[in-house]
Amino acid sequence: MAYIHGKTAAGRQEIEDRARRLPPALRSILLMVDGQRDDDALTALLPGLRAPDDALAQLAQMGLIDVVGGAVAPPAARALTAGREQDPDLYKRLYDWMSESVRRHLGLKGYFMQLKIERCTDAAGLEKLWPDMAAAVAKAKSPALASRWLSDTHALLDASPQLQPDASAEPVPG
């Protein structure tokens, strides 16, 4: 079972005032605890930060972090592009849609996202970027727009090649 850890009020206070004088490795792990990473992801960071193997347990014992969620990992969902990963038309539509979305919604902030898109060689690779892209749109614009972008992207899978997604959207002056 993977548990998700979050900072307690004492943990947030420690980040702010450094009253406990934590060793640098423990402080680094405390900074990484964000209420979204599970213990497996945090444990994977330990060697790179030269933190002790029991860093999470130490922080929990000090009352700086606490388990805020967790569950058994859900079964892997079947990819929406399954069976069509190598379809060049689908790849081109997704590639064009995602590249245009980066330009339209992220601008220069989307440079690294565009690099990730460029590295993808098939539709399945592009599909794996959807959560990152939606998160970037939510951060740059709004969560509502990110949700709409994701639903438009899903609709793109079923659209015929002649249809352009979000054709009703106003063009952005360029």
Image (cartoon, rainbow, N blue to C red):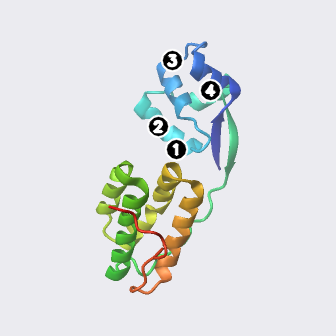
Tag 1 secondary structure = helix
Check disc 4: other Cα within 10 Å, few if <14, some if 14-19, many if 20+: some
Q: Quadrant of residue 114?
A: bottom left
What's the distance in space between the residues labelled 3 and 2, CA to CA? 16 Å
Mark 1–mark 4 Cα distance, whole angstroms, equals 16 Å
Q: Percent position (x, y) of residue 97?
A: 39, 70
At x 70%, y 26%, the residue is: 9
The answer to whether mark 1 and mark 2 are in CB contact below 8 A is: yes
Work out how far the residue at label 3 is from the one at label 4, CA to CA, in angstroms.
11 Å
**Residue under the image location 38 percent in, 79 percent down:** 90
Residue 79 visible to the viewer: no
Query: Which sits earlier in the primary sequence, circle 3 or circle 2?
Result: 3
Q: Quadrant of the C terminus?
A: bottom left
Marks 3 and 1, the one that precedes in the sequence: 3
Q: Which residue is mark 3?
A: 23
Vertical relation: 149 (above or below) 64: below
- In the figure, is residue 138 to the left or right of 4? left
Q: Could you tell which of marks 4 and 2 lies nearer the N-terminus?
A: 2
Measured Cα–Cα span from mark 3 to mark 1: 21 Å
Residue 71 in the figure: left or right of residue 166: right
Local crowd at mark 3 within 10 Å, few (<14), some, or many (≥20)?
Answer: few
Q: Which residue is mark 1?
A: 41
Mark sitting earlier along the chain (3/4): 3
- Circles 3 and 1, Cβ within 8 Å, touching? The answer is no
Residue for badge 2: 45
Label 3–label 2 contact, CB within 8 A: no
**Pointer 4: what residue?**
59
Judged from the image, the secondary structure of the residue bearing numbered disc 2 is helix
The residue closer to the viewer here, 76 or 165, is: 165
Element on which disc 4 rests: helix
